[in-house]
Image (cartoon, rainbow, N blue to C red):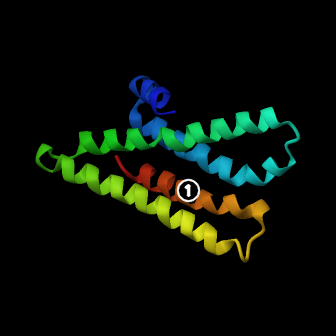
Amino acid sequence: GCVLSGAFAQKYGAKKIAILALALSGMCCILSPLLFYVSSPWLLICIMLLWGFFVVADSPLFSTLVATSVRPNVRGTALIIVTCIGFSVTIVSIELLSYLTKDISIYYMLVVLAIGPMFGVLNSLKIN
């Protein structure tokens, strides 16, 4: 996912591909209840691999966008902050899902994860 998104980013631009990867990752979250109805294990594996591709595809692109948009003297700090935010969102998401397992059916649990990509797409569209 990272390698292919990087190749596409060189052709179409990092911002466009990062937003597309975020949007497709969010769509996978929204459509996740349908996974419980997939009868073929091979189809399920293919869908999950594709989802995994989209989930990881945006990370190096956002690092590239940060590295190319900040002054050189703060580049390292900016990259560390963005990386920390990314890992923090991951940790909070895992904890939130653990907490919500008491109240939400497992069939709809992963739909909650669409909130992250949705905010990511909306905020990325604001950035020039």
Q: Is residue 121 above or below residue 93?
A: above
Q: Position of residue 59 (x, y in %)?
A: 43, 43
- The kind of residue tagged 1 is Met
Q: Position of residue 3 (x, y in %)?
A: 45, 28
Q: Position of residue 40 (x, y in %)?
A: 86, 36
Instruction: Identify which residue, 20 or 54, lies in the foreground.
Output: 54
Residue found at x 49% / y 38%? 57
User: Which of the 4 image quadrants contains residue 6?
Assistant: top left
Instruction: Identify which residue, 44 or 114, lies in the foreground.
Output: 44
> On the picture, is 42 further left or further right than 66?
right
Furthest residue toward left: 73
Q: Is residue 92 above or below residue 127?
A: below
Kind of element beneath mark 1: helix
Residue found at x 62% / y 67%? 97
> On the picture, is 70 further left or further right than 110?
left
Count residues near mark 1 (Cα–Cα under 10 Å), then give few for <14, some for 14-19, many for 20+.
Answer: some
Residue found at x 54% / y 53%? 117
Residue found at x 53% / y 46%? 22
> On the picture, is 30 further left or further right than 118?
right
Q: Is residue 10 above or below residue 101?
A: above
Return the residue at label 1.
118
